[in-house]
Image (tube, coloured by chain):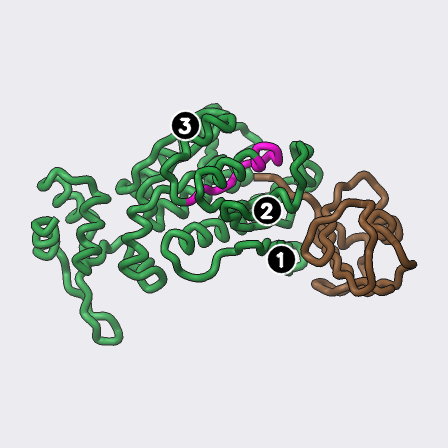
Amino acid sequence: MRVGVRLFGLLRRYRPDVPRGGTLSLTLEPDTTVGGLLKQLGITDSAPVVAMVNSTVRGLDHSLADGDQLYLFPPVSGG
Amino acid sequence: MGDIAARLRGLAEEHVKPDGQKVLLVCMSAVQQVAEETAHTRRQVELAALRAQIVPLRYGRNLGTVGYEGQIALLESTVGVVGVGGLGGWVVEGLARMGVGHLVIIDGDVFQEGNLNRQAFCLEGNLGQPKVEAARDRVAAVNGAVEVKAFQTRAGEREMSALLRGCNVIVDALDALPTRLVLQRVASELGVPLVHGAIAGFVGQVMTVFPGDPGLVALYGQKAPPEHGIEMAWGNPSATPLMVAAWQIHEVVKLVTGKGEPLRRRMLFLDGEVGVVDVLQV
């Protein structure tokens, strides 16, 4: 299955090959979870990530489906 | 109010715009004079002027954007700003300049040296001063027509709700996730929109949450989230709060005047590092 992923903020550093504002198209094994995708992208450090799948925030154990569009961005709370 | 308008008309100056349209302008000292003569506040006199199609000069550049009705709505509105740090300082400054009539400002902190890089009201000479005091002084200096209620408190849910009652819009300019979620609940219970803003490093986000909208809960969940986001590692440089506060000011202006479309169920995500602005459906 294929999903589209956009990385926001410093999460872009995990895929510097993606042009700014660009969407990364990934081919995944069926039943790959959000957590599995993060691992594939190399986002394995303790940096917290908010994962939005088709406009809804999902947990790490959420199974992805073909055609899903993901936004991965950092939780931002400074004021 | 009719006598106020008549008096203002006597003091106003006619100005011909490039399109040939004539407009009556009244300066700040004339507004002050009429306020004293008629024992009204400056805000009341400015309202009377606008209702009589006389433009207080200080709002002249607002009118093309918000119109007479919009400026009247702003002067009649009450906006709560919770947090007067990096975001809240610039938000208060902008709302005072727009002519929001009443501001309710809440913050429990005093200025520290580490605030100097980004907080509008933090000066070398006022370190140690409560932030809300500095905010009140600044508003008085910028726009004496604005009525300010300032509370130096780290308000819990009940106190926050009591202090913010009567506000038409509330601005979330806090810096900790758990308090932000409490504020969203308070705004929802009070039945008013909340304008959320947050910053970290080069990035920032803005979203307007209406009562009943999932808002921050959709982003971070119901459970007690970690107090801080990524900003502890990425820092808070000077420009990011300005960038996000500016959008928050526009959100408030739109909500109060009914102009434009608020960022409802849409989160603006600004990445200053690469110059990309996104709108995420939430």
Query: Can residue B110 be seen by looking at this rendering?
Result: no
- The mark that comes first in sequence, 3 or 2, is 3
- Tell me the distance, in whole angstroms, between the alpha carbons under discs 3 and 1: 35 Å
Judge left or right: residue B37 versus residue B172: left
What number is the disc on residue B281?
A: 1
Chain to which the residue tagged by mark 3 belongs: B
Which element carries disc 3, helix, strand or loop?
A: strand
Q: Are marks 3 and 1 in contact (CB under 8 Å)?
A: no
Judge left or right: residue B204 versus residue B122: right
Q: Which residue is mark 2?
A: B214
Judge left or right: residue B83 versus residue A16: left
Considering depth in this image, is A25 or B211 the residue closer to the camera? B211
Q: Amino acid at mark 2?
A: Pro
Which element carries disc 2, helix, strand or loop?
A: loop
Q: How many marks?
A: 3
Which element carries disc 1, helix, strand or loop?
A: strand
The answer as to whether the residues below labels 3 and 1 share one chain is: yes
Query: Can residue B124 be seen by looking at this rendering?
Result: yes
Q: Are marks 3 and 2 in contact (CB under 8 Å)?
A: no
What number is the disc on residue B151?
A: 3
Q: Colour of chain A?
A: brown
Chain to which the residue tagged by mark 1 belongs: B
Q: Amino acid at mark 3?
A: Phe
Residue pictured at 12% horizontal, 38% vertical: B39
Residue A34 percent coordinates (x, y) = 82, 50
Q: Quadrant of residue B125?
A: top left
Residue pictured at 44% horizontal, 38% vertical: B190
- Chain identifier matching the green colour in the rendered picture: B
